[in-house]
């Protein structure tokens, strides 16, 4: 985990609707990079809806792909939680 500048990302859902999200962190897990995003309107709230996206690059462009495998999502979240706990110690 690295200290990052606040960065916003525009996501487009399956219906073509755009929503702005704040990149709160990223981490490497099993040789892939995952980004943790929250909706901008929840940035200052205690409870946030965190979205985990896989970071890739295609033709020099950054691409964020939804992680749809629930088991993988749980593994990534657990690994991230462990990193947060280590940072707090």
Image (spheres, rainbow, N blue to C red):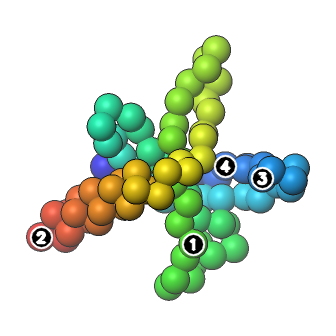
Q: Which residue is mark 2?
A: 89
Q: Which residue is located at x 36 percent, y 46 percent?
A: 27
Secondary structure found at label 4:
strand
Between 70 and 46, the residue placed more toward the observer is: 70
8 over 62 or under it: above or below: below
Query: Circles 1 and 2: CB distance less than 8 Å?
Result: no
Question: Can residue 33 be seen from the camera position used here?
Answer: yes
From the top left corner, tell me how far across and down residue 6 is, in percent: 54, 55
- Residue in front for this viewpoint, 59 or 29: 29
Residue under the point 53% across and 48% down: 67
Residue behind mark 4? 9
Which residue has dot 1 on it? 49
Is 37 drawn above or below residue 32 in the view shown? below
Label 1 neighbour load within 10 Å: few <14, some 14-19, many 20+ = few
Task: Bin the neighbour count of mark 2 within 10 Å (Cα to Cα): few under 14, some 14-19, many 20 and up.
Answer: few
Residue 81 position within the rendered picture, expressed as x and y whole percent measured from the top left: 29, 65
Q: Circle 4: is it few (<14), some (14-19), or many (20+) Cα within 10 Å?
A: some
CA distance for labels 4 and 3: 13 Å
Q: What is the secondary structure assignment of the residue under circle 2? A: loop
Alpha carbons under labels 1 and 4: distance apart: 15 Å
Which numbered marker is on residue 13? 3
SS of the residue under disc 3: loop
Residue 2 in view, yes or no: no
Q: Which mark is residue 72?
A: none
């Amino acid at each position: 985990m690295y200290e990052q500048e606040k960065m916003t990302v525009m996501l487009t859902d399956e219906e073509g609707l755009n929503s702005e999200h704040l990149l709160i962190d990223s981490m490497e897990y099993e040789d892939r990079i995952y980004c943790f995003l929250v909706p901008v309107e929840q940035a200052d709230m205690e409870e946030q809806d965190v979205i985990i996206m896989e970071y890739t690059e295609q033709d020099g462009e950054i691409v964020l792909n939804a992680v749809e495998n629930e088991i993988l999502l749980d593994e990534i979240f657990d690994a991230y939680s462990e990193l947060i706990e280590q940072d707090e110690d």
